[in-house]
Amino acid sequence: MTRTNTDDGGTSRDHSPVRGSGPIRGGGTSRDRSTVEGLGPIRGGGTSRDHGRAGVLLAVLAIFLSARTPSPAQETDAREIGILKLLGITASAESIDYVVNKTEFQLHTLLTEQRHPKTWNLGERIQTDTEAGLRMLFAVDEDVQARVEALAKDSAALESLAAEIESAILDKRRIYFYGCGATGRLAKQMESSFWRPFWKRIASDASLWAKLRGPLGPAVEDGLIGEMTGADRALISSLEGFEDLQLIGRLQLADRNIKKGDVVIAVTEGGETSSVIGTVLAALDQWKAAPGFDPALSRKKLYFVYNNPDDRLRPFARSRAVLDEPGITKINLTTGPQAITGSTRMQATTSETFVLGAALETAVERVLRRFLTKREMAQAGFGGEMTIEARLAAFGPILQEVKRSVPALARLTDLEARTYGAGRFSTYFARAGLITVFIDSTERSPTFRLFPLDTVAEPKRKCWIQVWADAPDIPSAWRAFLGRPFRGLEPALYRGPFETEIEDPYLRDKALASLTRAGNDQQKLYDFSFSDSAVKKRGPGKGDLCVMALLGSEAEEAGKPGSLFARFERLAVSAGAGLGIIAVTDTRESGAAGAGAGPGEPGMVRVRLAVPSDNDPFRLGPHIALKMVLNAHSTAVMAKLGKVVGNTMTNVSPSNLKLIGRATFLIQSHVNDTLGRPDWVRQYGTRRPVSYGEANAVLFDSIAFMQDRSKEIGQAAEVPLSIIRILESVRRNRDFTAEETLVLVQKPGLAAYLAEFGN
């Protein structure tokens, strides 16, 4: 394996497909590193190194040499013309910078970026058999079950975490969960779905609160902070430039007033997210700055949770800085490749949410047992005492129940896919399951390049999905989501460090632009209330779909005519919209709205799961079941709409450095796979594979083309545009322009286009 020296004395790893993982669509090629090697030291970690004029010239030369300009004797054969020359593209300065200086964000070797054999042909199979596609997706969750079972046998790190959370509660110290993207939403869920609702219920019981208020303090509900890169605004959509900065993790830690002695849990699916790494290293620096630093003490308070093998992460300097640090406890939850390549919102985040939720719930139970009787513990939702191992053992039965729901879920998947295919929209409504529903809805946008959630300024609906809360207005809706007021980033605190401490000009410009969209004013742009004004402006219409997510006793409440759930159902029926009901209850028998798993009335689909919440007052099990169902459902919907090729995320939005790398590799892999197919070779002959540098140059050209063309491009994505443009240009022996390509991207789409050349 080729390695290149980095300026921190480590190595930058070759990014060819991992042995045993298989190439993309069965014919991919290893990366051509001619665009990188021979340029001397390369700086990683998110900042651009000044290589001098000679280095830049070498970089440009390397990219164009990889394109192999033909000799005069070859000029008449377009198959030998370099891709960039054929397309009339000159690699942009940003593309050159990315290929040369951003090697630490080219993450193709990570296990989470590989293709899972169980879902290899998902995109094709699900077109004719929705149930089979869903079963393929849930089969990958068996990897989570295996990892959780292994962890139960070796739970020392989790026991340490639970013990420190217990101490933090008793000592009135803070517990700080921090993540980015999917793990950032996990952090929000720890606070807003698990922690705050539990303590609100406890405080509402006078007899229990009388015993707990004194020893735990009246502000115990505020003792856990769930924060994500970009704060609450990032719940809606990612803020470009933030994720790639260790600086923002450090600034947010200080902004939330996290101090030495607080428990810090930094969570990153890949194990390489800069903002998350910056958070845990900043917390460690607080310990190192104090006299008598002892790593044995700091690692009891600082935790780094991730989902890739250490050996895959060590080539990246920022990851290595944490892995080699004795003052931080590492909890590795590697499950393997994801159901959709790189889509860590699924198995990686499921495992993290379940495992960390189990540790948190165990710690709270142990705290309460110090002050409450057995009867009072049962009153609080805790029956017999449970170990962490016992809580982890609940995942297997949850997965089995989720699998049991497949026949009904497939009907809902088909219904939602038909809704979008007909140009219509969906509205989801939830109360206890609100955060879980909201997370799935917002994660669809970057994963499948959809319009983000609509703002109040939109004259009519653009986003396919909207989420409503049990709230009469905007501020109340945010409180329903978060259990507290909206919390943004104060620009005055962040602008100065961004301007002076971010060396990379591209990251600096993006971060400063994103900062203008991260403040407290952003809450006014989004209305998630189930209010008369929302119904009037954005209510469902004929052919739309309405979906209710019900947890526990909400299923019975939905059957009562005066309930808000019943009102939502009446609204759907009166508008001529379809209706879906997902109910997660304690038993299969209880709950009028959730009864049965059959199709229900015409236009109605009911999906019912029985997940007991005994001894689970956080409702961790029901939330995990709902998450898994929604993740598989939304992924299956997009696959049926052609937004997944095989099991690759070809509609990914290249909105940060990691996703730019993923997009580049997808372009390179799918193009080279097609160029090597027998049908292609038979019709168009052989051609040299496209290099990584060429693919990246075309990607940046596509990004530039799509800027300021929102009305024209709709929800088209850069990766399909780049793939089809390259292939059509080769096929036609001329530059097939981006404008011409866009027509093919929109119809028939990438999946159908590639199918033309065989499997």
Image (tube, helix red, strand yellow):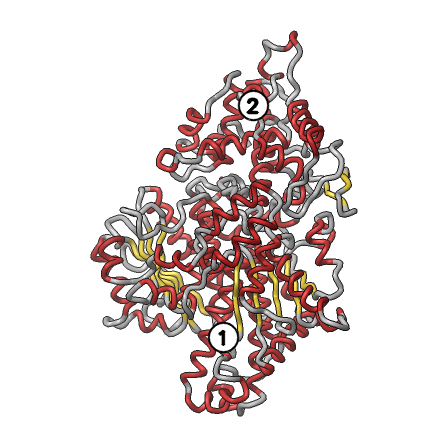
Q: Is residue 406 visible?
A: no
Q: Which amino acid does label 1 sit on?
A: Asp
User: Mark on residue 605?
Assistant: none
Q: Is residue 307 visible?
A: yes
Residue 549 picture quarter = bottom left
The N terminus - image quarter: top right
Single out the residue that lies furthest toward the top.
Answer: 73
Foreground of the two, 697 or 311 = 697
Q: Residue at x 38, y 59 (%)?
A: 523
Q: Is residue 651 left or right of residue 147?
A: left
User: Mark on residue 680?
Assistant: 2
- Distance in Å between CA atoms under marks 2 and 1: 61 Å
Q: Is residue 29 left or right of residue 629?
A: right
The secondary element bearing badge 1 is classed as helix
Q: In this view, does 567 lie to the left or right of 202?
A: left
Q: Which amino acid does label 2 sit on?
A: Trp
Q: Where is residue 19 in the image (x, y as percent from the top left)?
A: 71, 42
Q: Position of residue 612 (x, y in %)?
A: 48, 73
The secondary element bearing badge 2 is classed as helix
Residue 266 picture quarter = bottom right
Q: How crowded is mark 1: few (under 14 residues within 10 Å), some or many (20 or more)?
A: some
Foreground of the two, 348 or 65 = 65
Q: How crowded is mark 2: few (under 14 residues within 10 Å), some or many (20 or more)?
A: some
Q: Identify the residue under disc 1.
A: 222
Q: In this view, does 455 lie above or below 299?
A: above
Q: Which residue is drawn at 57% across and 68% down?
A: 176
